[in-house]
Amino acid sequence: MTINKKLLAIAGLLSAVAFMAMSPVKKAPADEKFKNLKVLPKNISEKELDKVMEEWERALGARCSFCHARNEETKKMDWASDAKPEKEMARNMFLMTQDINRKYFHGQKDSTGVITESSVNCYSCHRGVSHPEVVRASDLPREQRPNTPPPPGQPAWAPAPGTPPAQGTAPATTPAPEKKP
């Protein structure tokens, strides 16, 4: 009888293993791989997501914590949290650049559905600063541009008034009048 109990236990275990092997393994759908993706493709790979996040970090001169909140209970970043308003702003800015590139520069989508960079990206405005300063072009100092004629009364070789001397050169000076003995 002990042999029958062992055989029965073995047969039961084998049938359980066979049943589990035959039933389809439920993988998390691609859209559940990363939680709370609202503007990036749901099927984005981890490598692509890391690339996008690193690009945004560098363009804004910021770290992950600029947009992402920390879970104080786990002491880890809560990537899915929308607790910080900067995250929603980043989404809006991403959509804006995508729209500009599609509408005005005929940007095409890549394999993940993201419009490829053609002309405008985060760095176009941010230049490594999280809150870029708005500067009016009319407030900038005028400088002599190459291939433009000099203002009237100024020799072609002289820098525009108020333009600092080129690096490694002495400032332009007017020669002192010669003294007569």
Image (cartoon, rainbow, N blue to C red):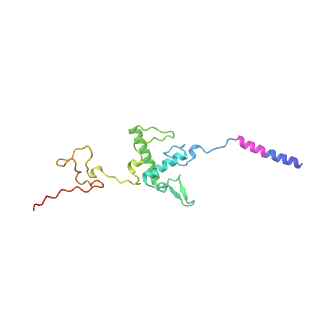
Q: Residue furthest right?
A: 1
- Percent x, y of residue 66: 46, 56
- Percent x, y of residue 8: 83, 46
Q: Residue furthest bottom?
A: 181
- Percent x, y of residue 95: 44, 45
Q: What secondary structure prevails in the magenta region?
A: helix
Identity of the residue drawn at 72% across and 44% down: 20
Identity of the residue drawn at 56% across and 44% down: 31
Looking at this view, is 28 or 146 the one in front?
146
Q: Going by the image, does 46 lie left or right of 96?
A: right
Tell me the quarter of the image containing the C terminus: bottom left
In the rendered image, residue 18 lying in the magenta stretch gets the answer yes
- Up-down relation of residue 12 to residue 164 (above or below): above
In the rendered image, residue 33 lying in the magenta stretch gets the answer no
Magenta residues (range): 13-23
Q: Going by the image, does 119 lie left or right of 50?
A: left
* Displayed quadrant of residue 22: top right
Q: Going by the image, does 51 lie left or right of 129?
A: right
Q: Residue furthest front?
A: 181
* Displayed quadrant of residue 45: top right
